[in-house]
Image (cartoon, rainbow, N blue to C red):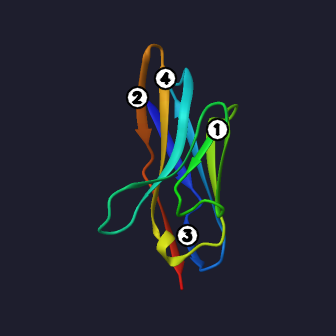
Amino acid sequence: QVQLVESGGGLVQAGGSLRLSCAASGSISSINAMGWYRQAPGKQRELVATISSGGSTNYADSVTGRFTISRDNAKNTVCLQMSSLKPEDTALYYCNARITWATVTRAYWGQGTQVTVSS
């Protein structure tokens, strides 16, 4: 069994910063890509940022230059540093990881952490 546990969400004023963290635990042989997605009310879940096991990163255009994704492979964690936050960044943020156990690889999701940016 694998668990992804997020932390770090909250309420912040526009222009402020927040740091999200996600820790993977359980039956893990290796972790491939990790990432963050978000879903605002009434909207579809969208990609925010991803990072490969080798450290290659990919960002949504809307967050490029403001958000930074990083990971610690030794600790099975991924973080999202968010700066210059805007009200439109308000959403439920989900951690995602593609995890291999023995010969099986599948995607796992965290439970989500709320980020609210006030204007």
Earlier-in-chain disc, 3 versus 2: 3
Mark 4 or 3: in front is 4
User: Residue 87, image x and y in percent?
Assistant: 51, 77
Earlier-in-chain disc, 4 versus 2: 4
Earlier-in-chain disc, 3 versus 1: 3
User: Residue 69, image x and y in percent?
Assistant: 64, 50
Q: Which mark is residue 10?
A: 3
Near-viewer residue (95 or 8): 95
Q: Residue furthest top?
A: 103
Quarter where residue 50 is shown: top right
Residue 94 relative to residue 12: left or right: left
At x 65%, y 72%, the residue is 84
Disc 4, SS: strand
At x 47%, y 14%, the residue is 102
State if disc 2 and disc 4 touch (CB < 8 Å): no
Earlier-in-chain disc, 1 versus 2: 1
| Separation of residues labelled 3 and 1 (CA atoms) | 28 Å
Earlier-in-chain disc, 4 versus 3: 3
Q: Which mark is residue 106?
A: 2
Which image quadrant: the C terminus?
A: bottom right
Mark 4 or 1: in front is 1
| Separation of residues labelled 3 and 2 (CA atoms) | 29 Å
Which image quadrant: the N terminus?
A: top left
Q: Which mark is residue 100?
A: 4
Q: Which residue is mark 1?
A: 56
Q: Crowdedness of circle 1 by 10 Å Cα count: few (<14), some, many (20+)? A: few
Mark 3 or 1: in front is 1
Disc 2, SS: strand
State if disc 1 and disc 3 touch (CB < 8 Å): no
Mark 3 or 2: in front is 2
Mark 1 or 2: in front is 1
At x 50%, y 24%, the residue is 27
